Amino acid sequence: MANTPTNPGNSVQLGDGLAVSPLGFGGMALTPVYGEVDPAEALRTLHHAVDAGVSFIDTADIYGGGSNEELISQLLRDRRDEVQLATKFALVGTPTDGYTDIRGDAEYVRQAVDRSLQRLGTDVIDLYYMHRRDVRVPIEETVGAMAELVKQGKVKHLGLSEVTAQELQDAAAVHPIAAVQSEWSIWSRDVERHVVPAAAALGVGFVPYSPLGRGFLTGTVDTASLGEKDFRRNIPRFAPDAASANQAVVDAVRSVADQLGATPAQVALAWLPAQGRRLGLPVVPIPGTRKAARIDENLGALALDLTPVHLEALDAASDAVVGSRSADPAWVSEGRE
């Protein structure tokens, strides 16, 4: 593989001085959560991402039961200095088989980071996230333990996933937070009510996961034919009646795409940094894919210029979305605010 460093001039500053590529890569797509995966193709896709300038690679200890971190370790062997590496801890279980616990106690934080470092084959993680909030443990304890990892040199920056505005504020009082990672897209906008304004006020960047609505916004998902182990079968807005109603938002995205000579995926991705500019904070989406060609398509979003007319049309469509984005409201920030 060609060793083509990312142009630092194209980087985006999140919080706490962390610079990343303007588009990231979500590693969960390279696990069996949406169906079976070919490991060789997955590794080729990762290399292509870095070749193309997508150097912000996101994973988690529970993706594939740790196998996703092990896969990414193969990328890092020769290209560690080209990658801004993010991983997460706190969930116990796997996306396909279900979760049995959430742990945010200090002892677990220390155990989890060492396991991730071993699987990843590296001595430092650029961005370490609390994946979900353990409500049994004060967030100050969890973030305090994470801050110790920074002092020890195991972690460079701290992040939080699916936290409320208050949880973010309490965490930031313990240690600077570089990024919040929560679901955010044209059809998932609940974070704009409280979490996004809090992040903007604190100088924290935002890393939207599922920026393509778990594929729905691309217009290529047939919800009636999802496999038995497909994670989306558990999400209310993918149920038959809701999915039929939500086709309206796909139609709106496709209409804007046609006007711009773009694809629906490019419009959905371009919407997020545009929304970040409207709301005053840096936004770096992390779409995932198994196919190298999709990475090139996704990068085309960075050149799109959505006009106020386009944004108004997409705003109107997003207001009509039916169904929760999570099978368990308490699982995400919206259910605890």
Image (cartoon, rainbow, N blue to C red):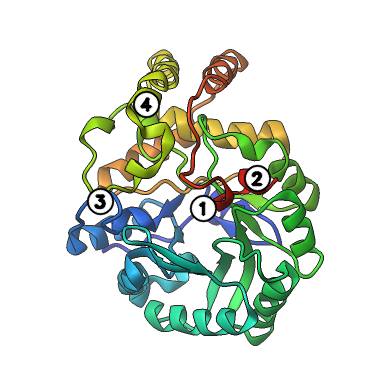
Residue plotted at (46% across, 71% down)? 81
Q: Is residue 276 above or below residue 113?
A: above
Circle nearer the N terminus (3, 4): 3
Give the secondary structure at mark 1: loop
Give whichever of 185, 104 is nearer the camera: 104
Tell whether 224 sits left or right of 303.
left
| Mark 1 residue type | Ser
Mark found first going from the N terminus, 1 or 2: 1
| Residue, disc 4 | 243
Can the viewer see residue 142? yes
Residue 285 drawn at (x, y percent): 51, 45
Q: Which part of the image, by quadrant, shows the C terminus?
A: top right
Is disc 2 surrounded by few (<14), some (14 to 19) or many (20+) residues within 10 Å?
many
CA separation, marks 4 and 2? 31 Å
Which three-letter amino acid code belongs to the residue tagged 3? Lys
Q: Which residue is mark 1?
A: 21
- State the SS at label 3: loop
